[in-house]
Amino acid sequence: MKIIFVTSNRGKVLEASDVFVPLGHTVEQFLDGGQLPDFIEPQSDGIEEVTISKMKQALMMVEGEINEETALIVEDAGLFIESLGGFPGPYSSYVEEKIGLDGILRVMEGEGDRRAEFRAVVAFHHLGNTHIFRGVCKGAISLDKRGEGGFGYDPIFVPSASDGRTCAEMTAVEKSSISHRGEALKRLIQFLTPPSM
Ligand code: ITT
């Protein structure tokens, strides 16, 4: 199957490729006339609503171009920090752009409770139906930035299942094996390949 990933984030496409290519699928980034499409992101407290809205917009752009060999994926994720009441959550992109990882570390200075989690919602559209899959990765905000890999908040996020390394200090395959996106995509794969009776 050809899986078209509707995202402006190349890191997400690479992570999805690591998961789907070994299973014989191909993964491509969605482009509209060779350009990354512009989406209207609804101001919403829920990443699920954002995901569904983006899927609806993408489906209008592809208008019947998808067939039974093609599927669309949209995914929205957010970092929810416990001591900040779940902030930045659905505003994670905006906060990363405006104050960056250093800004988050500054806000968290002196804070003992560093618990945080990433949440991902994946919408998968195939054969006229959209299915939703969720994933969560519990962890903590590190005291400093570490690592060069991954993207976004990876250098300041240490998953609970990690040996102390941030996501940016892991290989892509290691990160996917424990990440929010990896978990949501695993659920999608289970859906695509139900166990034989
Ligand atoms: P699209 O919406 O175009 O897919 P995006 O990068 O804006 O790309 P999200 O809205 O899903 O993606 O992500 C919200 C923020 O969370 C953004 O700043 C990302 O960099 C960050 N983020 C998402 N997944 C992440 C991950 O696995 N590791 C680190 N940061 C992540």
Image (spheres, rainbow, N blue to C red):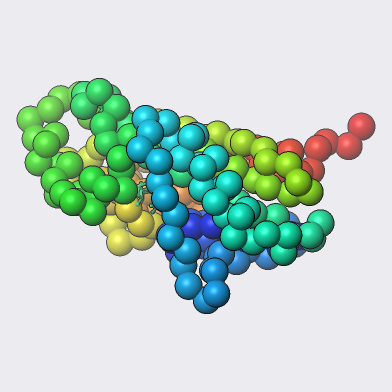
Q: Position of residue 188 (x, y in %)?
A: 66, 42
Total marks shown come to 0
Q: Quadrant of residue 147?
A: bottom left
Q: Is residue 123 left or right of residue 127?
A: left
**Image position of 98 with respect to 186: above or below:** below
The quarter of the rendered structure image containing the C terminus is top right
Give me the residue at 51% from left, 48% from top: 54
**Image position of 89 with respect to 36: above or below:** above
Along the line of sight, which residue is nearer the eye, 5 or 18?
5
Q: Position of residue 85 (x, y in %)?
A: 25, 23
Q: Quadrant of residue 119?
A: top left
Q: Position of residue 71 (x, y in %)?
A: 70, 55
Is residue 140 visible in the rendered structure shown here?
A: no
**Image position of 188 with respect to 20: above or below:** above
Give me the residue at 79% from left, 60% from top: 67
The residue at the far bottom in this view is: 34
Q: Position of residue 42 (x, y in %)?
A: 40, 41
Give me the residue at 48% from left, 57% from top: 7
Is residue 155 visible in the rendered structure shown here?
A: yes
Along the line of sight, which residue is nearer the eye, 158 or 15?
15
Give me the residue at 54% from left, 69% from top: 32
Along the line of sight, which residue is nearer the eye, 177 or 61?
61
Along the line of sight, which residue is nearer the eye, 27 or 74?
74
The quarter of the rendered structure image containing the N terminus is bottom right
